[in-house]
Amino acid sequence: MRNDHNEITILCQRLGKAHYEKDADAIVGCYAPDAVIYSLAPPLKDKIDLVGTREWLKTWDGPILVDAEDVNLVVGEDTAWSTALNRMRGTKTDGTREDIWFRTTMCFRKLDGDWRIVHDHSSTPFYMDGSVRAAVDLEPDSSTA
């Protein structure tokens, strides 16, 4: 018998490996063709896009490390969802080192027997002090994780 929880975990590991290897085809392959993306970058709503993914990967020098903590995965018969705190690290082509935490909610659907990401929502909180600055300096607090 197939273990759907493990298959989704492997899918997410493949996604992380694809980011590390800067493999746009592998990244896009983790998603359903009509997946809805709410990423950290504009626009407000997007679709998975091979050309756009390749262009984004070109802005990184070397691997992109994406780690997940506080993962909660709930699996149904043919749909599933997860929440996590993600950390993305790497160096941009201009030499800027990135190391940010952000929140992710993903929805999965079993399509033709294989799990795919159908919705990916990433966000950062923002400071409510009137500056509307993204709070990319936050890190998980072990007492609340």
Image (cartoon, rainbow, N blue to C red):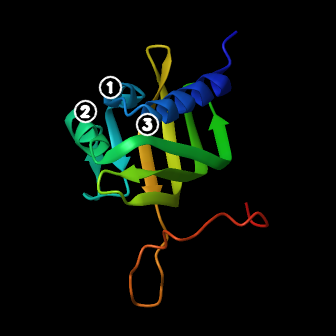
Instruction: Give above or below for 113 relative to 14.
Output: above
Where is residue 94 shown, x and y percent of the image?
29, 57
* Amino acid of disc 1: Asp
Labelled pair 2, 1 in contact (Cβ < 8 Å): yes
Residue 117 picture quarter: top left
Q: CA distance from mark 3 to mark 1?
A: 10 Å
Query: Which residue sits furthest front?
Result: 95
Q: Residue at x 43, y 45 (%)?
A: 120
* Amino acid of disc 3: His
Where is residue 122 shown, x and y percent of the image?
45, 54
Q: Point out the image quarter for the C terminus.
A: bottom right
Instruction: Indicate left or right for 56 with 8 as reference.
Output: left
Instruction: Give above or below for 139 relative to 106.
Output: below
Q: Residue at x 44, y 30 (%)?
A: 18
Between 62 and 127, the one nearer to me in the picture: 62
**Which residue lies under the disc numbered 2?**
50
Q: Point out the image quarter for the N terminus.
A: top right
Instruction: Give above or below for 3 relative to 43.
Output: above
- Nearer mark to the viewer, of 3 and 2: 3
**Mark 2: few, some, or many residues within 10 Å (few <14, many ≥20)?**
some
**Sequence-first tag of 2 and 1:** 1
**Which residue lies under the disc numbered 1?**
25
Where is residue 121 shown, x and y percent of the image?
44, 51
